[in-house]
Image: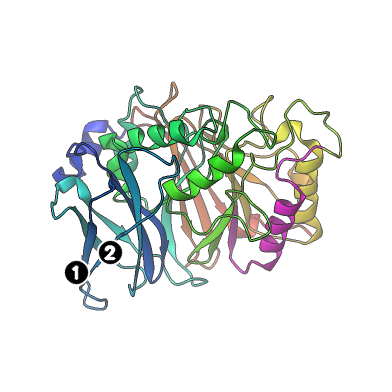
Amino acid sequence: MKKPLLIALLLLPFASLHAVPEGIAGPLVGAIEPDRVTLWMFAPAEAQCKYTYHSDSSDSPKSGQGQMSAVSNPAGEGPGLPFKSVVQGLSPDTLYHFEITVGGKSDPAWSGSFKTAPAVGKPAAFRLALTSCMKIGQPQASWYLLLAQQPDIHLTVGDTHYADTTDPTVQWKHHVAYRRQKEFATVLRNVPTYAIWDDHDYGPNNSDGTAKGKERSLAGWKQVWANPTLGTPDIPGAFFKFSHGDVDFFMVDSRYHRSPDKAPDDDRKRMLGDAQFSWLLEGLRNSKARFKVIVSGSTLNHSKADGWRIYTFSRHRLFDALKKHAISGVMYMSGDIHSSLVWEHHESDRIGYPLVEVISSGVAYSRTLSFATVDFDTTREDPIARVRIVYGDGTIRADKTWKLSQLVPKK
């Protein structure tokens, strides 16, 4: 099915095509809940950033305003600071429009919209977009194709830039520069975005838990994105959990505690580390959600050099735990390999039902310039997850649907 780029562009409001003003990056719409949203902005340190919002719905507050709070620059230097605010008192499943002013000035590029999340644990229908691998100097038009798909949330799963270092000053420059790309900036201010890192935005290529300076990478990552709280008080890392309706997402950190790729593939080799794995398993076991989605930058099988494929103990421990505890409705999402596809893992017998993996990689750094969308609909008697792979030429290269009844352990 063809969806020409021209049609995608015509579906966008003209205001979304404005260039990003100099010295500013953002806004970014981050973590979204039924009654709140986190907004992020980068602006000169001396500036005041204020926001206003309104909804056209008669069942929700029509308008509100507030001032954003400056937080420390993770690089410790530079011409600007990140500003964040949690806007509260919103209504669930409601469309809001917002505008941010910087130093009393407004600009069309500082306005956007977001739809609050449906009530947690309640049946809902929504669409997510899944991306990874973005680089300045590469074609960026697939972001407009993504917007034309009208996703409710956006998950970006690593290589959000290619700094290839743990130096926060260099990382910070890459983050801000890419957020000034008008195509990406348009997505960030109109689609609530959650992010997990992979090697190139965590540290050097194929980096792992031995990377020097990883603590600085983590400190910077916390400031640059508007994710929920990362890690736990006892376990550092970029991992976190969030819910959208009755779908739970477990964003796992496959870098901070990872054993080196070249370590012997035995029972001492770890992908997530024991503590993070226990956090994940406990979350999956306690989840009441219909679908439970594990999200990571690392693929399960399609990378022969830098994925779960060469971490046999860790992979089997996860699969076997899903079967032992009869955890249903699990899917996996990843990126990294500069190609997009959806498949069922060949070791699914270890789980007792097909383990579906959605790989989305290369939205702005690949031959295909592709991304994935996933439609969850848990309002049906038999809830579904529909996966589509969209290429940069506008074609849909895969369109597959799984019913929840297919993702239940066999007795």
Q: Nearer the viewer, residue 238 or 77?
A: 77
Give left or right: position of 121 versus 88: right
Residue 53: where, in percent of width, then height?
22, 65
Furthest toward the bottom, the residue is 59
The picture quadrant where one finds residue 284 is bottom right
The picture quadrant where one finds residue 89 is bottom left
In the picture of the structure, the residue carrying the numbered disc 2 is 95
Task: Tell me the quarter of the image containing the C terminus.
Answer: bottom right
Seen in the picture, residue 162 relative to 105 is either above or below; the reply is above
Please report the bounds of the magenta region as a residue range: 269-293
Furthest toward the right, the residue is 267
Residue 119: where, in percent of width, then height?
44, 72
Q: Are marks 2 and 1 in contact (CB under 8 Å)?
A: yes
Give left or right: position of 223 versus 233: left
Q: Amino acid at mark 1?
A: Asp
> Crowding at label 2, few (<14), some or many (≥20) Cα neighbours within 10 Å?
some
In the picture of the structure, the residue carrying the numbered disc 1 is 56
Task: Tell me the quarter of the image containing the N terminus.
Answer: top left
- Residue 38 appears in the rendering: yes
Q: Nearer the viewer, residue 328 or 154?
A: 154
